[in-house]
Amino acid sequence: MEIHYKKKAAKAINEMNKATKNRIKEAIIGLTISPPKGDIKPMQGYKDGRFRLRVGNYRIIYKYDSKGIVEILVIMEIGTRGDIYK
C-alpha cells in the first residue's frame, strides 16, 4: 500500500517535534494493515469516504483510494482536535 500526503498534511507533520512526529508516523503505518489499528471513525457529512484517526490530541483525516490493483492511503490533514474540524 502506498501512502500519499496532501501538502497541508506534510507541512503539519514537518512542523511537529520529534516525539509527536514519531507517534503520528506509527499511527499512519497502523492504517496500512488490515484491519487498521487505532481509534478510527468515519467522518460525517462527506461523501468521499473520509475517516479520522485519533492520536492523543491530534486527528489525522484520511481516505483510501485505488489505482488499479494498487491501494493508496491518502493523508489529507493532520492537526489538533480544536483546529482540524473547522
Image: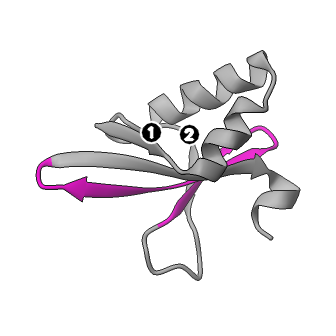
The amino acid sitting under disc 2 is: Gly
Residue at x-position 44% and y-position 39%: 31
Image location of residue 49, percent across then percent down: 43, 69
The amino acid sitting under disc 1 is: Leu
Residue at x-position 12% and y-position 49%: 69
Q: Are marks 2 and 1 in contact (CB under 8 Å)?
A: yes
Q: Is residue 38 left or right of residue 78?
A: left
Report which quarter residue 57 is drawn in: top right
Mark 1, residue position? 31
Residue 19: say if magenta. no
Q: Which SS class for mark 2?
A: loop
Q: Earlier in the sequence, mark 2 or mark 1?
A: 1
How far is the residue under mark 2 from the one under mark 1? 8 Å
Magenta stretch: dominant secondary structure: strand
In the displayed structure, 53 sits above or below 84; it is above
Q: What's the magenta region?
A: 50-69
